[in-house]
Image (spheres, helix red, strand yellow):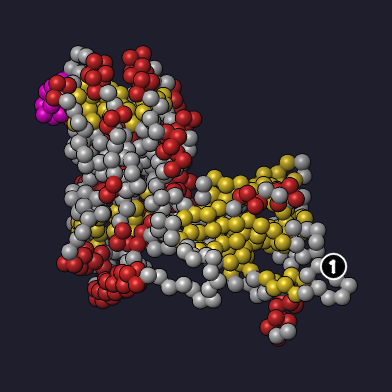
Amino acid sequence: MSKLFQKSLKLVEDHTTLDYQITEVWWERIFLNITVETKRDDDVEFTLRQFNRKRRRPKRGERYSQIIDMPIFKEIPAHPQTVEEADGVRKYHFVFNITAMDDRTFLDNGKWQLQANVPGEEPFTCSVAYDVAYTLIDKSRIYKYDDGKYSYDVSLGTYSVDGTTLSFVINSHFMIENETWNRRRYVQEALTFKGKFNRMYMYAVIEMMRAYYAVVEKASPKNGKKIMFMTETKPYLWGNLKYIDDRMKARGLDKEFDITYSLRNAVGTHKSALSWAELITKIARQDYIFVDDYVPVFGFLELSDRTKLIQVWHAGEGFKSVGYSRFGRAGTPYPAGSCHKQYDYVITGSERLVHVYSEVFGLPEKYFMPVGMARLDGFLDPDKIASFKKDFYGKYPQFEGKKIILFAPTFRGTGQKVAFYEYEKLDHKQIYDFCGDEYVWVYKMHPFVTEKPPIPKEYSDRIFDLSSYENINDLYYVTEIMITDYSSAYFEFALMNKPVLFYTYDRECYELTRGVHKSVKEEAPGKVCDTFEELIEALKNKDYEFEKTAAFRDANFSNYDGNAADKIIDTILLKKDNAN
């Protein structure tokens, strides 16, 4: 037995105890929920402890193999979300986001256990109740990514040192697919030649881009006054970015700050080497970069500590899973190297959405600022609404005196390149007949859907396509009824205090494949229609279940004050601690 091993036996012993026992374990998508109960009233702190175990053969007279902890590799603070106490029992409830358990990152490969640390006592490894332990094998998770070539596996299990008390274990491992699993290999199997070549080529390109960024960044003086507004999904400034930019100019801060713009439609398209060099040059020179969507360049370009990356996100709250909330499904992001992991600040529309977007971006909640959406600043201003209506009806006189039904669904497919919508799920004749002289039907399709709605010519006086209209929020001022599905479009529309219908012809399949944050049928703030016939009947009978919309509005906008842009500017750029 080596000296290191002998030392390990003395330094680290297993102190599993029934005093701190895990009594509940369950999953909510990527959130691992654990409840620990105790009758003690200690001033306790918890940690997740990575450990290694060695098994020694039982000596004469011993009934069990001796399992011994080797030196600790890592400890991570674990903070309970809630603490409850009743009838002398204290319950600590933990909600672990597996995509961000170690601050921004996943747990490393290995074994982890939950440990209770009480001052003056040896650390306690939390035990697990027998009835819970029986269920753990069914609570393991496999999250595939990169078309199934890799996976992140989280298995839950137990071990026992004394043959009675069970210790709880989280096994965290990143795996690679083994095409020839039925052959024993003693070294890691090689990838294909083509795969190796492509990897080498991409690695070389990325390394050159990183090296170029490092040189330019180091040569660029930083004074805290350089800002870039950046989007990779549109060639123009819009939404939250535009409102922050407009507010800075209204306050005269464009004289104090040097503002740069990078506005291009680059996601899913090929860009030249010169275009990439120009972009990286801009990035390297900034103190602050504001983005509003997925920006893949930050997946491989690690920003200097001198630059802060702020995500203002373009959407409120929808049903469809995005980012890490779809981890393990088609189109899942990588465990590491995702641009979402680089944000220094994430702006959310409300306190309630922090939990939602912590899951989406795989970040701890401390990085989030629930100050509201900048594009909603002044959204309900009567003068603004009146001015827009005048301009709108001047441009579209055919809508004057009509009630607009705005049809704004999200796309189908795994991403921008293959996005589509099944227009055959709509009956234009029935829509036309329903509209009559009272309504008009207006399409506002997701920007990813390039196929235009196939509106028959004979119906074009009541059915229109405004998908190219830049700002959907402005259309809300003239909309009477919104129809959407899993999109976040309903979030801001709720402020108008008008009805929303949800047309979800593929609801169950969508929920089970794409994934959703919550049940559409149970949580939608309006009537859910799973067939076109149900949708038409709801329109005819004005059956909107509007009370759900009103309740949603009260829950999400009760503290809405319309000053989000100022709060963002004051807190992040002007460093004001009292930015309320």
Position of residue 97 in the picture relative to residue 527 (left or right)? right
In percent of width and height, residue 246 lies at 21, 46
User: What is the count of numbered marks?
Assistant: 1
Q: Please give the residue where the numbered disc 1 appears in the rendered image.
A: 63
Asked if residue 563 shows in the view, the reply is no
Q: Does the magenta stretch include residue 398?
A: yes
Q: Which residue is drawn at 34% across and 59% down?
A: 309
- In this view, 140 is above or below 475: below
Position of residue 461 in the picture relative to residue 477 (left or right)? left
Position of residue 39 in the picture relative to residue 400 (left or right)? right
- In this view, 221 is above or below 468: below
In percent of width and height, residue 143 lies at 49, 54
- In this view, 500 is above or below 109: above
In percent of width and height, residue 397 lies at 11, 23
Which image quadrant is residue 382 in? top left
Q: Which residue is drawn at 25% across and 64% down?
A: 283
Q: Which residue is drawn at 38% across and 51% down?
A: 331
The amino acid marked with disc number 1 is: Arg
Q: Neighbour class for label 1 at 10 Å: few (<14), some, many (≥20)?
A: few
Q: Which residue is drawn at 70% across and 85% down?
A: 2
Q: Is the magenta stretch mostly helix, strand or loop?
A: helix
Q: Specify the farthest residue to the bottom.
A: 3
Q: Which of 325 and 351 is in front in this view?
A: 325
In percent of width and height, residue 323 lies at 40, 51
The kind of secondary structure element at disc 1 is loop
Q: Nearer the viewer, residue 164 or 557?
A: 164
**Residue bounds of the magenta highlight:** 390-400
